[in-house]
Amino acid sequence: MNDASAPPPAPTTVAQALAHAQAIGLARIDAQLLLLHTLGRPDAGRAWLLAHDEDRLSAEEQQGFDALCARRQAGEPVAYLTGRKEFYGLPLQVDARVLDPRPDTETLVDWALEVLRPLPLPRVADLGTGSGAIALALRHGLPGAQVVLAVDASADALAVARANARRLHLSVDFVRTNWLDGISGPFDAIVSNPPYIEEDDPHLAALVHEPRQALASGPDGLDDIRTIVVQSSSRLAPGGWLLLEHGWNQAQAVQALLRNAGYAEVQSRADLAGHARCTGGRMPGAPAAAAPLETPAHASTWCMPPSSGPQ
């Protein structure tokens, strides 16, 4: 029989809350980020938790933290629970309308900056921009770029990306279209982290909280990459690069698609785990000296009249 006069449980300390979260299966870093968010200190860093490990949580904080831990156990990304994710040093706001940016995608940004920084006025397009992570990282790293164009077919995704651009004070042009439909170029680089998971891949079940249209792409996962490879060949300037993220086991297939489409210097780059995660190729020809456009560099400069289908 319960003793109605029993005192309420003692408040949980920071250290106890983290230990409990790990005991029920949460990764340590996930528990730390969720607790910092709960305590209203998202920017304090994990060192703050160590320095305050004996601080006690209020009942409301404990309940909020427990609820976030339960949602994380159910597979919801930490970025959706906190509403934020750092990518390439930029604090992004994200939610379930866009894909949770992965650290491995920073490999794609590294490569794009490598090929674009030698150019005086580079022009670059990011296809399937989602939260705007890649486009914003490129604009931040290329303040003198003539144009950074971010493309997505989803109005919801573009709303998230535009909000991030405004909050970070980064000038990026946005276009809603399917890949390069209606966009003329030319660009010195086209980059994309498109959907590349096979449509019947059992791992999709674990990604139920993320937008499926940003994940799956046909029976072999390469439908969207095929479209981008074909469309980009007529939108790249001579010497321009197409750089693509793909699955850990798709490098050879993507290399073949690029070579068959006439790209040169086809190669792949490894992600943080050592897997060939990004593949790119260069259009033949020497890059021309970039010159300022006669009209202001904004989205309409780069768009053709809408087409009836992929080109």
Image (cartoon, grey):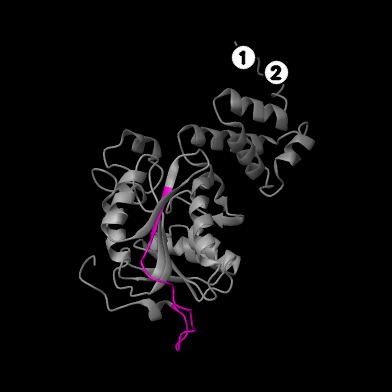
Residue 228: x %, y % from top left: 31, 60
Locate residue 157 relative to residue 67 in the image: left or right.
left
Number of on-image labels = 2
Q: Is residue 142 visible?
A: yes
Q: Is residue 163 magenta?
A: no
The amino acid beneath tag 1 is Asn
Camera-nearest residue between 135 and 253: 253
- The Cα–Cα distance between marks 2 and 1, rounded to whole angstroms, is 8 Å
Quadrant of the snapshot with the N terminus: top right
Q: Is residue 12 visible?
A: no
Disc 2 designates what residue? 6
The quarter of the picture where residue 251 lies is top left
Q: Is residue 301 above or below residue 280?
A: below
Q: Residues within 10 Å of mark 1 (few under 14, many from 20)?
A: few
Disc 1 designates what residue? 2
Camera-nearest residue between 141 and 276: 276
Quadrant of the snapshot with the C terminus: bottom left
Residue 188: x %, y % from top left: 44, 70
Camera-nearest residue between 306 and 121: 121
The quarter of the picture where residue 220 lies is top left
Range shown magenta: 278-298
